[in-house]
Image (cartoon, grey):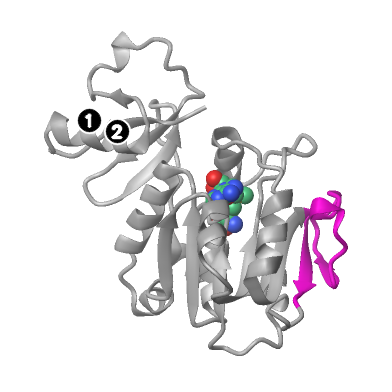
């Protein structure tokens, strides 16, 4: 499933049509909702707002927008298991987040590194990441997002042309819905809207690329990616981080 683009700006239809085609999305012109009865309440919309853009489900009623809210996320100062995986690395280390999604984990990684390359292959997610960076204005948030370099690509292509330019590679491939509980809204949106990826080959490429560590986020009940045993794991209530320490021979 893909979201449908809808614009709340005063921009011309031509500009919005161009954006829709660049993002590979259908466009719904405001005011024409009634003509599209098939656009049911479970349809996702990418709403291009005057200041911020966001994702939402359905067009009726007031809902919490789903967006790259770096300002809100930067207020969470709790030491997470992801940051524990970075322990021992110098604060000037470089990171590639090869599966950026909404960039929440990338933001955390920016707190303990010098640079984070965010790779996201889905064009409309890349657009939301750009929008989230553009709307970050507080000094502390800016100090983090200024470490970001955003790339729209399949990480496989990135690894194929670049060589060993980062200390750490982070992989958070999609894991399927588990149990009956729905995930947080933005994670659920990713599950509903993007394709699951087996990512075995991504791990092999990441291990060849990283100079120091590869960190893989998995559901706690999932097997190791590529059945490859990590150097160590850190397990939380739902999620497990598998850490592969890379020997410095390359
Ligand atoms: C589970 S989400 C990541 C969530 C992210 N860690 C966050 O904090 O928001 C996985 C994301 O990786 C992207 N992705 C999966 N495989 C990819 C690949 N080979 N190259 C680039 N992006 C990929 C998907 O489009 C999806 O947005």
The answer to which of 39 and 63 lies nearer the viewer is 39
Residue at image point 77% right, 34% down: 180
The part of the chain drawn in magenta is 219-246
> Which residue lies under the disc numbered 1?
17
Q: Position of residue 169 (x, y in %)?
A: 63, 68
Q: Is residue 91 left or right of residue 129?
A: right
Residue 155 on the magenta segment: no
Query: What is the C-alpha distance between the residues marked 1 and 2?
Result: 5 Å
Mark number displayed over residue 36: none
Residue 217, placed above or below residue 250: above
Q: Circle 1 — which element?
A: helix
Whether residue 76 can be seen here: no
Dot 1 and dot 2 residues touching (CB under 8 Å): yes
Residue at image point 33% right, 32% down: 5
Q: Position of residue 163 (x, y in %)?
A: 55, 70
Residue 229 on the magenta segment: yes
Q: Position of residue 240 (x, y in %)?
A: 79, 60
Q: Quadrant of residue 145?
A: bottom left
Q: Position of residue 217 (x, y in %)?
A: 72, 59
Whether residue 67 can be seen here: yes
The answer to which of 216 and 31 lies nearer the viewer is 216
Mark number displayed over residue 20: 2
């Amino acid at each position: 499933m893909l979201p449908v683009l809808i614009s709340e700006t005063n921009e011309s239809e031509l500009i919005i049509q161009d954006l829709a085609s660049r993002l590979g999305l259908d466009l719904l012109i405001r005011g024409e909702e009634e003509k599209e009865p098939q656009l049911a309440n479970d349809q996702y919309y990418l709403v291009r707002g005057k200041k911020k853009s966001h994702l939402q489900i359905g067009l009726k009623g007031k809902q919490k927008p789903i967006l790259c809210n770096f300002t809100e996320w930067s207020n969470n100062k709790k030491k997470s298991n992801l940051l524990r995986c970075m322990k021992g690395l110098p604060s000037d280390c470089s990171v590639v987040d090869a599966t950026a999604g909404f960039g929440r984990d990338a933001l955390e990684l920016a707190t303990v590194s010098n640079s984070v390359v965010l790779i996201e292959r889905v064009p409309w997610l890349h657009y939301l990441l750009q929008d989230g960076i553009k709307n970050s204005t507080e000094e502390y948030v800016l100090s983090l997002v200024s470490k970001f370099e955003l790339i729209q690509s399949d990480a496989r292509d990135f690894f194929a042309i670049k060589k060993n330019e980062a200390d750490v590679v982070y992989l958070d491939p999609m894991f399927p819905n588990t149990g009956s509980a729905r995930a947080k809204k933005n994670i659920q949106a990713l599950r509903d809207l993007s394709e699951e990826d087996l990512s075995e080959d991504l791990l092999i490429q990441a291990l060849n690329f990283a100079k120091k560590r590869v960190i893989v986020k998995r559901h706690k009940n999932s097997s190791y990616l590529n059945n490859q045993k990590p150097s160590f794991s850190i397990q939380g209530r739902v999620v497990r981080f598998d850490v592969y320490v890379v020997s410095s021979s390359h």
